[in-house]
Image (tube, rainbow, N blue to C red):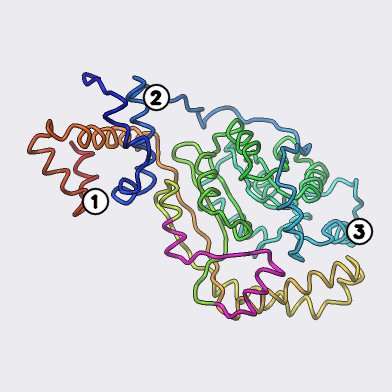
Amino acid sequence: RSVTLSLSSLQLFTLDPPWMASLAGPFVARRVSCLVRAACAGTVGKPAAVASHHSPRRLVSSTTATHNGNSDAAAAIKSAQLYALVEARVDGELRERGYGPASRVPADVLGEFDNFHYHGVVAVDAAAVRLGLQAGDRVLDVGAGIGGPARRLASKFGVAVDALELQPNLSSLSSRLTDQAGLSGDVRNICGDILSADTASLVHQAGPYDAVVSWLVFLHIDDKSSLLRRCHDALRPGGKLYVEDFFLAKPLPSPRWEDLRSHIYCQSLPTKDRYLELLSDAGFTNIEWQDMSEDWTRFVDARYSEFEAERARHDRVMGADAASALDVFYGAMDRLFKAQLGGVAFHCTKPSQDFYCRTQRLCLCIALTLAYPHRVSQQHAKILKHVVTRPPVFVHRLFEV
């Protein structure tokens, strides 16, 4: 605060020059840019208001709210047969179990068929344990589908969930099923596109969340850089992200890419290294990557075989058209995993508020050092050399200083 900064002398930092991003990484480069603006405005050192994650549990309505989602994307994703005639499938499974569309249905009964990802409620429970979720925590489910994971988290772990879903019919069905399960006070269904400004604003106002979760949805979204930043923004400092997704474990033959694009609505896939880079660039730390490829290969093979063996039952319960669409989807997934498609379950952390305070000091120190090189002492110059030669050592040393 004893140094008066002029905007002109620090203008290069506000432009996020490529060399700065390559030197310290995009995340730190963005922080430097923001901090220089704050320094020039005299607001450095004034902590931003952060809502306490210990706030009382919020009661929410399960009524679906629509927030200008991307209608083109919502229509395009229907090319994935998994999302065809979902209402017919759900109502058929309810009838088979003796329930109507307005009956009260236990969440455990819905859990037998309302999850679109692998291993159903078992996978949801495992994720909750890894995240360390506790009663009263607040969770955002990105790509919530018909609300299976959201209802499981609310009913078994006592958390409050915002279930964000792009497709209006799935979000509406999720709202209905949530009401039927008696969980309307714990799960709020939101229809919107997480990449849209309106939905992002809504999520920001509703947050911050203790955890953001997503099961087999990120694969539908090409712009993973923006997607991960939105997830990062939605979390409180110290909050965690849990995702199950596909990745490119090895090159896929052309017919399998056709399966991905035509039947799965997946236009591209990152490699493991690229995915880890995107997570780091978005600001996440403590990334734990669990390769699920072999497990999911066995799962989809058994699922497809069982579905084929029970085809007469599925035609009767959900209707021939719905069963045929699901058969095409299951067959495509079986072919993809046999071609060594990669599957992953990863979780990572948004750094704590203490980390951000230290990062602010680090970034401002870098900015001041580079802006006023003639004032740099020998000690600081020696430390700064580590930025080029040994960045991790430099960061650690500067934090100590």
Q: Residues within 10 Å of mark 3 (few under 14, many from 20)?
A: few
The answer to whether 158 appears left or right of 325 in the picture is left
Q: Are marks 3 and 1 in contact (CB under 8 Å)?
A: no
Residue 45 showing in the rendered view: no
The label on residue 95 is 3
Helix, strand or loop: magenta stretch: helix
Which residue does the image show at 35% across and 31% down from the upper left?
Answer: 35
Per the image, the residue denoted by label 1 is 391
Residue depicted at x 37% and y 28%: 37
Residue nearest the observer in this picture, 94 or 357? 357
Q: Nearer the viewer, mark 3 or mark 1?
A: 1
Amino acid type for the residue under numbered disc 2: Pro
Indicate which disc residue 47 carries. Answer: 2
* Label disc, if present, on residue 224 of the rendered structure: none
Q: Amino acid at mark 3?
A: Arg
**Left or right side of 71 for 397:** left
Q: Which corner quadrant of the image does residue 111 belong to?
A: bottom right
Which quadrant holds the C terminus?
Answer: top left
Please report the residue visible at 73 percent of the width from the left and 43 percent of the height from the top: 191
Q: CA distance from mark 3 to mark 1?
A: 61 Å
Q: Quadrant of residue 12?
A: top left
Of residues 150 and 389, which is closer to you in this image?
389
Q: Position of residue 152 (x, y in %)?
A: 68, 50
**Which residue is at the front of the view, 84 or 311?**
84
Q: Please, is residue 244 above or below residue 169 in the view? A: below
Is the N terminus in the top left, top right, bottom left or bottom right quadrant?
top left
Determine whether 344 is above or below 48 in the image.
Answer: below
How far is the residue under mark 2 from the one under mark 3?
55 Å
